[in-house]
Amino acid sequence: MIYILVLIAIFYGVLTYDIRQKNDTKSSYYHFIMIVLILISGLGYRMGGDGMAYMFEYPQYNVKEGFSWAALNSYSGRQPAWVLLCKICRSFTEEYWLFKLVHAILVNCMVFYGLKRLTSYRFTAILFYFVLIYFEINFQVLRQAMAVGLFLVAIQYMRDNKWIKYYLLVALAIAFHETALVCIAFPLIKFIRIDKSGLMLIAGISLIAILFSSNILDSIINIDLPEEYADKWSYYTNDIDTSSTFSSYLNVLLSFVIPTVYIFFRKTNHGDVLVEKGALMYGLLYILGLYFPIIYRINLYFIFFFYLAYIDLIYDLSKYGLSLFESNVRKIKSITLSGTKALTYVTLIIVFLGIKSRFYFSEYGDTGMPAWVQYYPYTSVIFKDIDKTREEFIHRL
């Protein structure tokens, strides 16, 4: 029930501020939604497979060891900034709820701050965030969530060519999760042009990687890594499924083909070039991720660009639908056009989110259960209810 109420609240923001473009209480309502999502995340209890794993390991961060650089780097597979955050929270209380609340505040504030500066349709962006990736960011990949949030904040400094601030934030992101290393090279995207040569370069990279995927995979699998990363590396390199199914073709169409065609043939000039390039990067990495599953984790840094490009696409389609409708009914004075654009916009959003959210109903790993059992029903640290189905799910992981 709580998720339905949140969806209604966000949809109200979409209709009022993104479509009707009212501005009087826009900022206040945006912050209200942010606080709601912070509380849902921060007060969540025993939710998410990885989230529960972090909860179980939390007591191992011993404050008495101190906060020296050596102490922060003494935990296998955990970066120093993550260890520092855990230890700071444990300095106040050994209860996990404080850390979870602090984490929820930091991550969601960074996401909301970043999205506000990347799009004019901030409530639609938050809707996409809540439906498609909120639960993963807040209840699964907690360490990487900090890195992704820092990257979203850093993007504004990259756009303004404030490189010291950008790379300081990237360095902090790396101190939370090693995958943030990809953010070091992200500014090179500025040199890629959105024209035939640029798209041919992207297509060429994809084709070469696919044609030589078996050779590349053999080289990747044989990489000798430290013990703390070896098991995780093996998990990602062995979890490869390149079978051709309708679902895989549909995802390629949605994630790469449609955004690429839309961005290339776009005739308007209101688009954000950085967002468009980031969306193309996401599409490229999505294709490569079919053959190199570890890329999925890297692509979390670019997934918001993909969402924002689709929001622009949906907005343009709704305007086109309105103009087409107006031209056909211009002579019929009794027909009102006031809700046509809103109806088209909302319909396209629902269709897109419906298609992309199918993963909640797919089997998660080898558990024999769908992914949604990790997040529904919602359980709060206030009441500390335990869902038996979710506990069985965790046991099967």
Image (cartoon, rainbow, N blue to C red):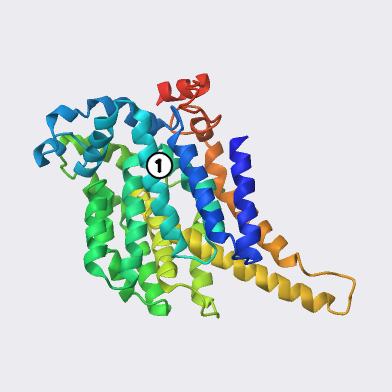
Task: Tell which of 120 and 92 is nearer to you.
Answer: 92
Task: Tell which of 99 and 397 is nearer to you.
Answer: 99
The relative height of residue 96 versus residue 177 in the rendered view (above or below) is: above
Task: Tell which of 200 and 168 is nearer to you.
Answer: 168
Amino acid on which disc 1 is placed: Ala
Q: Quadrant of the C terminus?
A: top left
Q: Is residue 332 left or right of residue 24?
A: right
Residue annotated with mark 1: 104
- Classify 10 Å Cα crowding around label 1: few (below 14), some (14-19), many (20 and above): many
- Give the secondary structure at mark 1: helix
On the image, the x and y values in percent for residue 87 come to: 23, 34
Residue at image location 33% in from the left, 47% down from the top: 146
Quarter of image, res 281: bottom left
On the image, the x and y values in percent for residue 238 come to: 32, 39
Quarter of image, res 170: bottom left
Task: Tell which of 345 and 324 is nearer to you.
Answer: 345
The relative height of residue 333 versus residue 397 in the rendered view (above or below) is: below
